[in-house]
Image: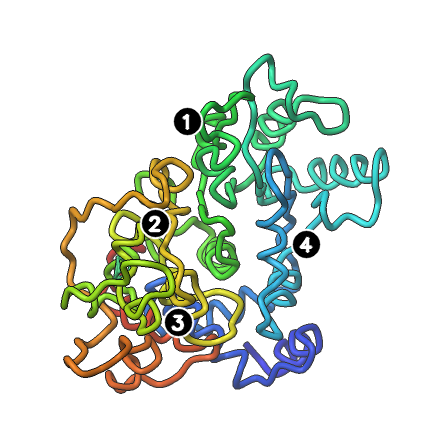
Amino acid sequence: MDDRSFEKVRGRLLGVSRRDFMKFCTAMAASMGLPLSMAPRIANAVTSAKRAPVIWLSGQGCTGCTESLLRPSHPTLEHLILDLISLDYNETLNVGAGHQAEAAMNKSIEENHGKFILVVEGAIPLKDGGVYCQVAGRPFVDTVKETAAKAAAIVAIGSCASWGGIPAAEPNPTGATGLPEVLKGSTVVTIPGCPPNAYNFLSTVIHFLTFNKLPALDDKGRPKFAYGRLIHANCERRPHFDNGRFALKFGDEGHRLGYCLYKLGCKGPMTYANCPSVLFCDVGSGAWPVGTGHPCFGCTEEGVGFTIPLHTQADVSHFTPAAAHPPIVEDQGSAVTPGAAALLAGVAGAAIGAGAVAAKKLGEIESDKEQS
Ligand code: SF4
């Protein structure tokens, strides 16, 4: 990226220094498990003059996915997202409404045929011809199928769009279904979570723009860089699990000391996601459910979140060793944080915090293999 390009993007990013911007690109490369030498290519993709058009359709959801996209407190993330993409249609954020908004969407779809990214938020009801979710007088399922046929890439954001989520919970009166089921035969990237992590969406879009292809996906359509490891493998409370120290009741001594939440129903041993390393809202170490003392609900895992009751103890089938945390000693009251683990490992800080550092360590281990 030459200086002129950088100045252009810096203006858009509201005063982000070149150094911080390159740190961000390096952290993005690391979080995707790419070699750090890819950072300049990512920087070029992010600063490209042409923003990727995005049509964001909302079905049976609470708009929490859109909210999570806009709520990180890191000063650049929402600007990076909105500078990277041209959000041509999003019912929550549209300024226009009614026919005006529909016309804008149709115009963007026709002008960007085969080039835009379709993002679907919320589940899609199929029962009774899809009448339980209609937008602009049409069953949502019809709009989704028609739009997907013209898209360059398709993303299901959040657990509802990925497999049905809360609307599909028993007894599922509307026949709520996830996007991969509706678009069988098409490649659908799923970014589950309730809410999903904005970094995982951003990283997926950056990967697509940088390499003109989607990142490596698992058998549920989830990017492997984000959903390749069990939460239990990276959790900062894992040393307590390994040493048999558990909170038995909310507010008891073990809970106050930061012990493992397994006996309170934590689904970390059954759930694949990078929550412990990427965290939420950029407010520092511990900013994720388990970090605040709440058991993982398994929201990124089909068949776990919204399916297995919170109080039911998880099956522990994979005894993967803790990946990012050194063991604790007997007399410590709380587990070592991801940031401390990174420091112990002698890893430098990165623009998006200790979470990115942990992701970098994991990324280096997983290396290019998964991305090829
Ligand atoms: Fe962390 Fe939950 Fe695993 Fe305990 S059971 S180590 S709280 S993920």
**Front: mark 3 or 2:** 3
Callout 3 secondary element: helix
Numbered badge on residue 86: 4
Dot 1 crowding, Cα within 10 Å, few <14, some 14–19, many 20+: few
Is 278 above or below relative to 11? above
In depth, the one of 152 and 265 nearer the eye is 265
Q: Amino acid at mark 4?
A: Ser
Report whether residue 240 is seen.
Answer: yes
Which residue position holds label 1?
185
Do labels 2 and 4 touch, CB within 8 Å?
A: no
> Within 10 Å of the Cα at label 2, are there few (<14), some (14-19), or many (20+) other Cα atoms?
some
Residue at the (25%, 85%) spot, across then down: 344
Q: Nearer the viewer, mark 3 or mark 4?
A: 3
**Amino acid under label 1?**
Gly
Mark nearer the viewer, 1 or 3: 3
- The CA distance from mark 3 to mark 2 is 21 Å
Q: Is residue 151 above or below residue 251?
A: above
Q: Quadrant of residue 113?
A: top right
Q: Quadrant of the N terminus?
A: bottom right
Residue linked to disc 3: 355
Q: Is 62 placed above or below 124 here?
A: below
Quick check: is the Cβ at mark 4 less than 8 Å away from ligand 1? no
Q: Residue at x 48, y 33 (%)?
A: 164
Residue type at numbered disc 3:
Gly
Q: Nearer the viewer, residue 297 or 190?
A: 297
Residue that carries the numbered disc 2 in the rendered image: 216
- State yes or no: discs 3 and 4 in contact (Cβ < 8 Å): no
